[in-house]
Every structure is written in C-alpha cells, then in structure tokens.
Image: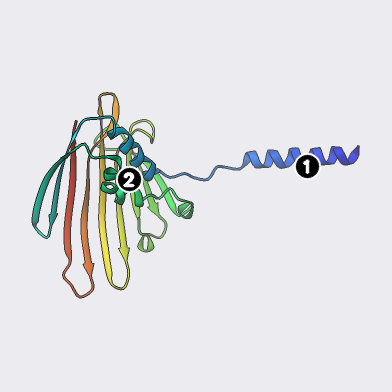
C-alpha cells in the first residue's frame, strides 16, 4: 500500500511539474502566412502587376489567375525566410511597441547575434492580434566565399471584402559575385481585386 501511495504521489508531482513549464516561444510563422495567402487567392479574381528592376533596367508585366503552384514559387523567398523553426528558438529577442503612425502594434524579432544571422531582424505590424498582420518586413543576408546577397523583403495586407488579403510585396537588394560588379535589384508585385 505504501508503495502504491508513493508511486501515485510521484506521478502527481511529476505531472504537476510538467504543467508548470512555460511553453517554448513561437515566432511569427511566415511560411504558414504564405500558405494562407495562397489559399485565399484561390477564391478571388485579381490581377497581379509586377515590376522588376535590375541595374536600372525596368520590366513590367500583368498576370491574372495564377495557380497555387505559381504563387508558391512567386512567394518562395518569403516562405524560406521563416524564423519559426526549432533551430531559431531562443535566438531572437522579441520587442513590442505601438506603431507611431497608426493604431497597429509592431512586433520586432532581433537575432541575438545579428552579424552571423541570415535573418537578423523581422518586423510584423498587426491589429489586436498577431494573426491579423498588416505588414511583414525582414532583412535576409547570405554570404559565402563566392558571393553575398542582401535583401529586404516586405509584404502588406489590406482588409478587402471582410478578409485580410495580400495587397503588395517587394524584394529589394543586391547580389555580389566574387570578381564581378554588384547587381542591384527591386521586384514589386501589386494585386488588384
């Protein structure tokens, strides 16, 4: 009887210890947000106007009714810049502040070692809750012995027909390949519903 009481007591104590643990911080899931965008766009008629500039040469095009595979390719840079992964838990500090120009809250994720990080920071502007984001902006860097890439990625959302839909996105930056000139680029996509 004493053994059974002891086992039950140990189980109760160990269970209560587990429930007191704090959950792991979960960062804004950009990959999930991109999937939501793709799912939303499947139900709307829209046109996408894209502008691309590379070293001063500009090109513009209009597209309609992209399928989900094309949108996945179009937004792949954003999906791949997701900091909500196990290896990033504990390496980003989180700061919340009111946006000075609106009624939104700004959540900023800053890497604790920004010089070594591919994504040194990310900002999410949102209304009331993180899921209701109105913009996402982040810096993405990649460097090795042969090349370096620097990008600022940005997405903006707008309430359209009662849903928080993608309004526009952009990628601005440069690429430097060893022994060649730096190539500056800017890509912008704007949706009309």
Q: What is the x, y in percent for residue 172?
A: 20, 53
| Foreground of the two, 154 or 64 | 64
Residue 118: horizontal and vertical position, in percent? 35, 59
The first of marks 1 and 2 along the sequence is 1
Q: CA distance from mark 1 to mark 2?
A: 45 Å
Position of residue 144 relative to residue 5, above or below, is below
Which secondary structure lies at badge 2?
strand
Determine which quarter of the picture holds residue 2: top right
Q: Give the labeled residue for mark 2.
A: 123
Q: How is the image coloured?
A: rainbow
Expressed as whole percent of the image width and height from the top left, the position of residue 162 reads 29, 24
| Numbered-mark total | 2
Residue at 78% over, 42% down: 10
The residue carrying mark 1 is 10
Q: Can you say whether 161 is above or below 176 in the image? A: above
Helix, strand or loop for disc 1: helix
Q: Nearer the viewer, residue 141 or 64?
A: 64
Q: Position of residue 53 (x, y in %)?
A: 13, 54
Q: Residues within 10 Å of mark 1 (few under 14, many from 20)?
A: few
> 187 or 128, which is in the foreground?
187
Q: Residue at x 20, y 75 (%)?
A: 179
From the viewer's perspective, is 54 left or right of 80?
A: left
Residue most extreme to the top:
162
Q: Quadrant of the N terminus?
A: top right
Q: Quadrant of residue 47?
A: top left
Label 2 environment density (alpha carbons within 10 Å; few <14, some 14–19, many ≥20): many
Which of the image's four quarters has the C terminus? top left
Furthest-right residue in this view: 1
| Tag shown at residue 167 | none
């Amino acid at each position: 009887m004493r053994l059974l009481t002891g086992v039950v007591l140990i189980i109760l104590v160990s269970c209560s210890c587990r429930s007191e643990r704090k959950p792991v911080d979960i960062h804004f899931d950009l990959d999930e947000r991109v999937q939501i965008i793709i799912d939303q766009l499947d139900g709307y008629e829209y046109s996408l106007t894209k502008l691309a500039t590379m070293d001063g040469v500009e090109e513009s095009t209009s597209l309609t009714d992209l399928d989900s595979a094309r949108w996945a390719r179009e937004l792949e840079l954003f999906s791949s810049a997701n900091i909500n992964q196990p290896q990033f838990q504990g390496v980003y500090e989180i700061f919340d502040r009111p946006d000075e120009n609106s009624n939104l809250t700004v959540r900023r994720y800053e890497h604790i070692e920004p010089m070594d990080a591919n994504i040194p920071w990310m900002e999410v502007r949102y209304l009331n809750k993180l899921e209701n984001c109105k913009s996402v902006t982040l810096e993405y860097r990649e460097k090795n012995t042969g090349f370096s890439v620097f990008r600022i990625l940005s997405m903006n959302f707008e309430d359209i027909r009662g849903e928080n839909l993608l309004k526009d996105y952009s990628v601005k930056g440069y690429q430097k390949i060893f022994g060649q000139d730096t190539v500056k680029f800017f890509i912008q996509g704007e949706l009309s519903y």
